[in-house]
Image (spheres, rainbow, N blue to C red):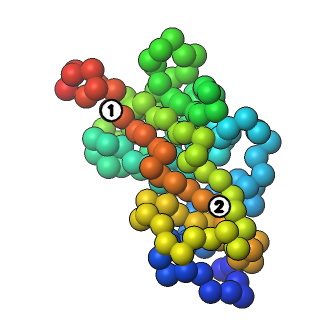
Amino acid sequence: MPTTHTHDEPDGINVLDADDVGFVPERMAKPDYYDGIAPSVAANVVREFGECPRCEHDIDPDVTDAVHVDRDVEWTDQGGRHTSPHTCENCDATLRILAEEKLFGTIGYPRLPDSMSDDVYFVRFDDGRQYNVVNTHQLFITDLEELRGEI
């Protein structure tokens, strides 16, 4: 069911309805993790907004392969971390994914900016009183084979 809201939103921002995304905004707004971005939140945002840099296919990282490092979340085989990189199911590229803590947040309607970069999305929920903020400038997906010069 579409979200209803009773106020105007600025024209200079990207606003999505809860029905436009593949996660439940209310649950994302209240993760059970309070030290940076939660791995479950990062995985949901990557599924919705990330794509393979080699073939541009959607990616679906396994949250259990993620590691929380310095308030960020990553999937990689670099640096001796106990995690696994993501493998693209379309082209088999080995991907390092870094979701920085500022990738995701929640704000209320009064804090909506008048304009914002095209890479920032506001996901409306709670009848338009709350918004998940997704800043895709803070999401880095790298082809490890290309990085290492293997392709």
Whether residue 121 is situated above or below residue 17 in the rendered picture: above
Would you call the spot at circle 2 few (<14 residues within 10 Å), some (14-19), or many (20 or more)? many
Whether residue 72 is situated above or below residue 127 in the rendered picture: above
Would you call the spot at circle 1 few (<14 residues within 10 Å), some (14-19), or many (20 or more)? many
Q: Is residue 25 visible?
A: no
Count of labels in the image? 2
For the N terminus, the quadrant is bottom right
Look at mark 1 in the image and give the residue it sits on.
143
Q: Is residue 67 visible?
A: yes
* Residue closer to the observer: 80 or 102: 102
**Residue at horizontal 54 percent and vertical 39 percent from the top:** 100
- In the shown orientation, is residue 34 left or right of residue 63? right
Look at mark 2 in the image and give the residue it sits on.
132
Q: Secondary structure at mark 1?
A: strand
Looking at the image, do the residues carrying marks 1 and 2 touch, with CB atoms under 8 Å apart?
A: no
Q: Position of residue 113 (x, y in %)?
A: 57, 70
**Residue at horizontal 54 percent and vertical 75 percent from the top:** 114
Whether residue 81 is situated above or below residue 104 in the rendered picture: above
**Residue at horizontal 51 percent and vertical 23 percent from the top:** 84
Identify which amino acid the numbered label 1 is placed on.
Asp
Which is closer to the viewer, label 1 or label 2?
2
Q: Secondary structure at mark 2?
A: strand
Q: Residue furthest top?
A: 80
Q: Position of residue 144 (x, y in %)?
A: 34, 26
Instruction: Compute the Cα span from label 1 to label 2.
Output: 28 Å
* Residue closer to the observer: 95 or 105: 105
Going from the N terminus, do you reach mark 1 or mark 2 first? 2
